[in-house]
Image (spheres, helix red, strand yellow):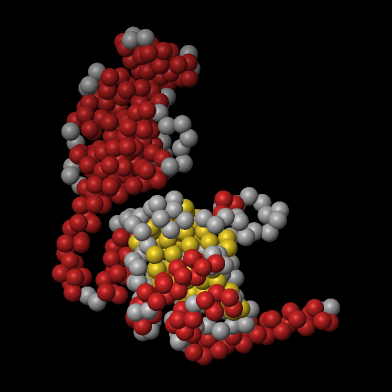
Amino acid sequence: MNVTRLLQQAVEARRTGRLADAREQLAEALKLQPGQPQALNLLGLIALDQRDFAEARARFRAAAQADPREAALWMNVASAERGLGDAEGERAALDQAIAIDQRNLMAQIRMAQLQQRLGERQDAADSWGKVLALASGLGDIPPALAETLETARHFVQEHKANFAAFVEAGVADRLGAADPVARRRFQACLDHEFGRRALFQNQCSGLHYPFLPADEFFDRQHFPWMAQLEAQTDAIRAEFLAMVARDGGNVRPYVQQEAGTPQNKWTALDGSLDWGASFLWEYGVRNQAVCAACPQTVAALEALPRADIPGRAPSAFFSLLKPRSRIPAHSGVTNTRAIIHLPLVVPPGCFFRVGGETRAWEEGVAFAFDDTIDHEAWNDSDHLRVVLIFDVWNPHLSLEEQILLKQFYATADASKTQSVLTGI
């Protein structure tokens, strides 16, 4: 009888509980082919079934030595070592299985469980992280594995939270004494490191100027005129409210898509006054009616160092967000500008997110942000929210760069005009 047939018979004998027959057939197979790894492994499994861990280890080790690239054999060695209470032997066997294939999910799970039993929390967290990464690509997950993965998530989250608390306690005094800019940036660094927030990059649908910091909210120190603007909040608000009460304020839907535009994230707001706007300037063009109705607002804006690019800037408008309305997440055209918000009417329940940071508007407290970083706004209140919005140069651009950009746009526009005139 050949070895293959003997192995088949031994498997069936073990399955049906005829262990003596299985051992006899395996012994015969080993006579025909000494060191046959499958025969040795089956003898190890029989010993493991009977909790004879020493015999199981000897058989499994012999099988693994005969076929050292078979990870399943090393996994069986690890099972026997665990039965014997030999943690280091178990670790060594699992290391062998993982060295053969880092994607061996069960080997990674058992390594994580071993490290957790031994109190090696950092190593266990690292191993559980590998397990979760491997499992993320799986389709149907059996209930037992799903339970293991949930336990893994809980362990990793708890470990990260404890580690974060330890680190933050260690830097608390120095961080508390830091200036606001350093404190905000370092806290964002910690939050990203500990998985509490994502980092966002510029997504420009138009001109993307290289090497400018991708900061969600610009530091106030870049805008020394901001307090001067805030001091005029009451006057600006009063002008807006009087204009709206008098003639509706030239408010129109902010979102107006061309006919035939396919359905998209803006469809719900298309042509809707849920998000309305009353423009003082729009792409550098002055709205005479609104400006005439709001002379103090115009004077406040004209006193600021705004960008002046024909056909492009400045833009300035009153932004109206109706109750229970939301502006979906989006990003802007170019990172060469900063967008300023001066909140005028802000009921509780109104929020604004840029990247990983969410703020509640405060009436009369202005801020600047980079609108090429993913941002959104919502009004969960029962009242209207009104903000004055306008654009200025990105504060990280030098005056020379601003002049070059203006020349770029002027030249580009002239080129387009020349093409139309000449047919080029």
Who's the residue at 31% across and 24% down the image? Answer: 44
In depth, the one of 259 and 344 nearer the eye is 344
Whether residue 323 is situated above or below residue 233 in the rendered picture: above
Q: Residue 256 location in percent, x, y?
A: 62, 60
Q: Residue 394 location in percent, x, y?
A: 47, 79
Whether residue 410 is situated above or below residue 257 in the rendered picture: below
User: Residue lying furthest right in this view?
Assistant: 423
- Asked whether, in this view, residue 22 is left or right of residue 394, the answer is left
Q: Quadrant of the C terminus?
A: bottom right
Who's the residue at 28% across and 19% down the image? Answer: 49
Q: Residue 36 location in percent, x, y?
A: 40, 27
Residue 168, by quadrant, is bottom left
Who's the residue at 55% across and 57% down the image? Answer: 273
Number of residue marks? 0
Residue 6, by quadrant, is top left
Residue 285, by quadrant, is bottom right
Q: Residue 217 location in percent, x, y?
A: 39, 70
